[in-house]
């Protein structure tokens, strides 16, 4: 992969030919070819089968012509691999048999040894390094979001127990997220060594926190994760993060993911003109008419104003009921429209 690869160049804010595009959850139930080979079992079993994981990773690349592949895996893989007791229930998400409650539960979070605990991740990457025509993104769950699953036991709307642990027992909270930061670091480093050309840290639910809580209880651990993986472009993503975006940007990441609640020009105004952004089409818009989708895509590109530091994406994952033809059209439109915008901007700058 050369430095003129559009995705890697955009992550660095460097000039390139066209706006790159990929979609969070691009491999998934919206694809008939995914449903055909995925079977009924736990997603953790599918992830543990390297040739299946590699095939599922490549399905959206082949169908959509996206500019990056994201490894088919899940944010709970490291905690599950060290034996915490997590499953991912279809239609629900991660479910923990015995939620994290007190100090004794720290022992259930020993360090990850990627070569022996998750060899299948490295084997899938080995296949992808040979077979993927585009850079492969490795990823991990950020300490806060993974902690919220371990503490709540299942997906939560309020994060009540998580916030109660933070404020009620900060010492235990910091020890917990320190261990989760270590797990994320080991996992990301091994994915990079295995060939991942960029990484994304998913702090999907960080938007549930106030700026003060984020800054005190989350930002230091997240910064430690990014500091440990300086070798490749680092993307930082969360949902509903408009009010903490400046804090999420200030963690050592290279690219800030934004959801649809904050227009891309407003995000760049808040974070500074050199900020590299990823996003931010509302995935639910893709369930509507193609005219509306086209107008929204055009609006995002217009708001980005030809800035080279833009990776087009959805504001969150592809919804399972999405028609793949719509995403195909989005990729086509982003690729068609963006060279014009880039040359427009270069022209204006001269
Ligand atoms: O295409 C990709 O984005 C790559 C693979 C990927 C998956 N999970 C596969 C998956 C990635 C990057 C993730 C990350 C992940 N997992 C996050 C962060 C991203 C986000 O959505 O905010 C979170 C919060 C999880 C936890 C998780 N795993 C949830 C909430 C669910 C949904 C449950 C459901 O069935 O709707 C999962 C399951 C999951 N992970 C699926 C996929 C493709 C669903 C389908 C299946 O079981 O085959």
Image: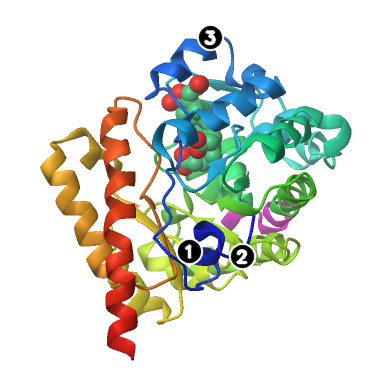
The quarter of the rendered structure image containing the C terminus is bottom left
Instruction: Answer left or right for 125 relative to 94.
Output: right
Q: Residue at x 76, y 27 (%)?
A: 120
Single out the residue that lies furthest toward the top.
Answer: 40
Indicate if the residue with disc 1 has its beta carbon within 8 Å of ligand 1.
no
Front residue of 76 and 207 = 76
At which x and y percent is residue 248?
51, 66
At which x and y percent is residue 58?
55, 31
Residue 285 lies in quadrant: top left
Give the label on residue 293, or none: none
Q: Indicate which disc, 1 or 2, sits on the residue closer to the N terminus.
A: 2
Q: Is residue 34 magenta?
A: no
Instruction: State the extent of the magenta-drawn residues as a range.
Output: 166-176
Q: Is residue 175 magenta?
A: yes
Q: Indicate which disc, 3 or 2, sits on the residue closer to the N terminus.
A: 2
Magenta region, main secondary structure: helix
Badge 3 marks a residue whose secondary structure is: loop
List the residue tagged with mark 1: 256
List the residue tagged with mark 3: 39
Instruction: Answer left or right for 182 relative to 155.
Output: right
Q: Residue at x 59, y 15 (%)?
A: 42
Q: Indicate which disc, 3 or 1, sits on the residue closer to the N terminus.
A: 3
Residues at marks 1 and 2 touching, judged by CB atoms closer than 8 Å: no
Crowd around label 1: few <14 · some 14–19 · many ≥20 (10 Å):
many
Tell me the distance, in whole angstroms, between the alpha carbons under discs 3 and 2.
38 Å
List the residue tagged with mark 2: 3
Badge 2 marks a residue whose secondary structure is: loop
Which is closer to the viewer, label 3 or label 2? 2
Q: How is the image coloured?
A: rainbow
């Amino acid at each position: 992969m050369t430095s003129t690869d559009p995705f890697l160049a955009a992550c660095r804010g460097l000039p390139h030919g066209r706006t790159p595009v990929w979609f969070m959850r691009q491999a998934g139930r919206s694809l008939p070819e995914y449903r055909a080979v995925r079977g009924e079992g736990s997603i953790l079993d599918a992830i543990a089968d390297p040739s299946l994981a590699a095939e599922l990773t490549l399905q959206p690349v082949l169908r959509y012509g996206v500019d990056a592949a994201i490894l088919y895996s899940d944010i709970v893989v490291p905690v599950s691999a060290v034996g915490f007791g997590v499953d991912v229930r279809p239609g629900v998400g991660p479910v923990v048999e015995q939620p994290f409650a007190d100090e004794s539960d720290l022992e259930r979070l020993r360090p990850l040894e990627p070569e022996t605990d998750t060899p299948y991740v490295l084997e899938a990457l080995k296949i992808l390094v040979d077979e993927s025509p585009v850079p492969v993104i490795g990823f991990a769950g950020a300490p806060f979001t993974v902690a919220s699953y371990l503490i709540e036991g299942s997906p939560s709307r309020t994060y009540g127990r998580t916030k109660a642990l933070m404020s009620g027992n900060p010492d235990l909270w910091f020890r917990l997220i320190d261990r989760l930061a270590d797990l994320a670091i080991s996992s990301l480093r091994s994915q990079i060594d295995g060939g991942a050309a960029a990484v994304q840290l998913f702090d999907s639910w960080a938007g549930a926190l106030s700026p003060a809580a984020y800054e005190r209880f989350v930002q230091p651990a997240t910064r430690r994760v990014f500091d440990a993986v300086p070798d490749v472009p680092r993307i930082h993503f969360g949902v509903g993060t408009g009010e903490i975006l400046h804090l999420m940007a200030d963690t050592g990441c290279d690219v800030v993911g934004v959801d649809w609640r904050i227009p891309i020009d407003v995000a760049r105004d808040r974070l500074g003109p050199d900020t590299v952004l990823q996003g931010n089409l509302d995935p639910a818009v893709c369930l509507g008419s193609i005219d509306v989708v086209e107008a929204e895509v055009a609006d995002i590109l217009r708001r980005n104003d030809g800035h080279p530091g833009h990776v087009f994406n959805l504001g969150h994952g592809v919804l399972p009921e999405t028609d793949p033809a719509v995403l195909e059209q989005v990729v086509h439109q982003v690729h068609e429209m963006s060279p014009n915008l880039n040359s427009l901007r270069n022209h204006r700058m001269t």
